[in-house]
Amino acid sequence: MSERIYIFDTTLRDGEQSPGATMNRDEKVRLARQLEILGVDIIEAGFPAASQGDFEAVRDIALAVQNCQVAGLCRALPSDIDRAWEAVKGNPQARIHTFLATSDIHMKYKLRKERHEVLDMAEAAVKYAASKTSNVEFSAEDASRSDWPFLAQVFERVIAAGATTINVPDTVGYTQPQEFAELIRYLLENVKGSHKAVFSVHCHNDLGLATANTLAALKAGARQAEVTLSGIGERAGNAALEEVVMSMDVRKDFYQLTTNINKEQIFPSTRLLSLIIGQPIPPYKSIIGANAFAHESGIHQDGVLKNRQTYEIMTPESVGRQEEDMVLGKHSGRAAFDKRLKDLGYRLDEEQLGIVFTAMKKLADRKKEIFVEDLEAVVLDEIFRLPDKYRLEYLSALSGNMAIPNAVVKMYVDGEERILSDFGTGPIDAVFNTIGKVVGRSPKLVRYAVNAITGGTDAQGEVTVKIEENGKTSVGRASDADIIVASAKAYLNALNRLAKRQEDSICARL
């Protein structure tokens, strides 16, 4: 009989630490609801003590999600634990996740503490967290580079203090699959009271082994996998949820492990993440990439035509990829539109539905075919964006090899109308120069990327920009059938996010 594996998704915490993957509060709540539909067991919603914005996002997610546990990460400090509990306590299965480094290099150079001090600190933190909830997870940061007997000693102390989940992270992506499996077996056999806790693993992908290490640990006896959608996260990322889950599903015979994941929601979930963070899914990405089920070789094509299992170990439908993506046109009615949104997992009120319906009708007048990706892009642009300090009303740009590129912009800044024209080396440069002068800011453009949301020459362009000003960075995203307009919206989105961060910093100091 298969044993159950708990899926702990940290897309909203570790995943958001991936460069360019920042999300606002509404986007985080939307993604958390999709993770709930996906069937993850635990959502790590953020690090509440990091900022007021992070605290509020975790609190809202804890209230919005009721069918799975919501965890808040915190250092092994009473103030952090208090902040985390305050944020997650609205969830009926709230979890406090506290951590402390246990490797010699971290204890010496980062913590500047001796082993006995770390033991006492870990025990005290878990005991304090357990006074608030029975659902406490303890992580030994850099566990894979820690001394094994000392690590076992730490885990014995925190289990006795009330930890019900023990996490063994490969924090820097250093370990190897066989080595990691041996560590898990060692801990299960040598930690007194190990049967009282669920052992978990959290693997990073610095050597490209995050999924392999996670699966090796699960095979060795760990029963919780900490993962992210598409494997996003710090540095080279984390173990990818879709890879871990589908490996166990396709190779049931080998692992004899099961999860609560609704596998048909895997692709919709990763696609939603892609739209929110403005980073396309690489075509060669396993399971969810555009090429994952494509066959170009004649030999492969012949085999697939005769029997799909000759070259496909899973079906596109098994992970939620649909052959027919077209959903709506200019003549579609509001009822059909509402139903399609609900099928995609969106629950909009009447006002929001009206806003998106109007925007889709305008898009349908300019675009021959409307696809799921178009629909989701409009929802994200129109509903889940930050309130506008800077708002675009009108844009006209001129360029070509016989003209000096220039842009005319009509905008509202804090509700005040402003119109200006300026030049640039190209249409995008002209637009950004003009907007910068209108708002009185001149941030450095760190990154600019354009991606076609769907196929076809009339596809919506999705633009992502990253800007930097006074040491603070901000990422903006937007989509439009006109990439010049999309660029302007993305730039303004980044400016709005930057302004919001600066306002939050000022409020925090008051």
Image (tube, rainbow, N blue to C red):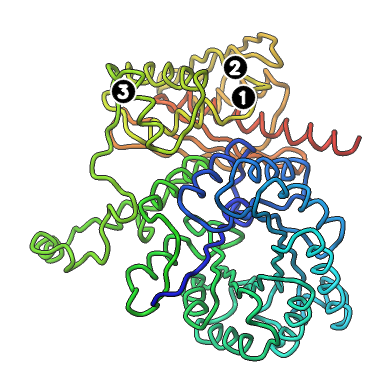
* Distance from the alpha carbon under mark 2 to that under mark 1: 7 Å
Residue that mark 1 sits on = 433
In the rendered view, tell whether residue 11 sits above or below residue 375: below
x then y, percent, for residue 262? 40, 54
Q: Nearer the viewer, mark 2 or mark 3?
A: 3
Q: Quadrant of residue 298?
A: bottom left
Element marked by disc 2: strand
Q: Quadrant of residue 390?
A: top right
Q: Report the disc number at residue 422.
A: 2
Q: Earlier in the sequence, mark 2 or mark 1?
A: 2
Task: Name the residue type under label 1.
Answer: Asn
Element marked by disc 1: helix
Q: The C terminus is located in which quarter?
A: top right
* Distance from the alpha carbon under mark 2 to that under mark 3: 30 Å
Contact, CB < 8 Å: mark 2 with mark 1? yes
Q: The N terminus is located in which quarter?
A: bottom left
Q: Earlier in the sequence, mark 2 or mark 3?
A: 3
In the rendered view, tell whether residue 282 sits above or below residue 109: above
Q: Residues within 10 Å of mark 2 (few under 14, many from 20)?
A: some
* Residue at image location 27% in from the left, 16% down from the top: 331
Element marked by disc 3: loop
Contact, CB < 8 Å: mark 2 with mark 3? no
Task: Name the residue type under label 3.
Answer: Lys
* Residue at image location 83% in from the left, 79% down from the top: 119
Residue that mark 3 sits on = 367
Q: Earlier in the sequence, mark 3 or mark 1?
A: 3
* Residue at image location 16% in from the left, 68% down from the top: 310
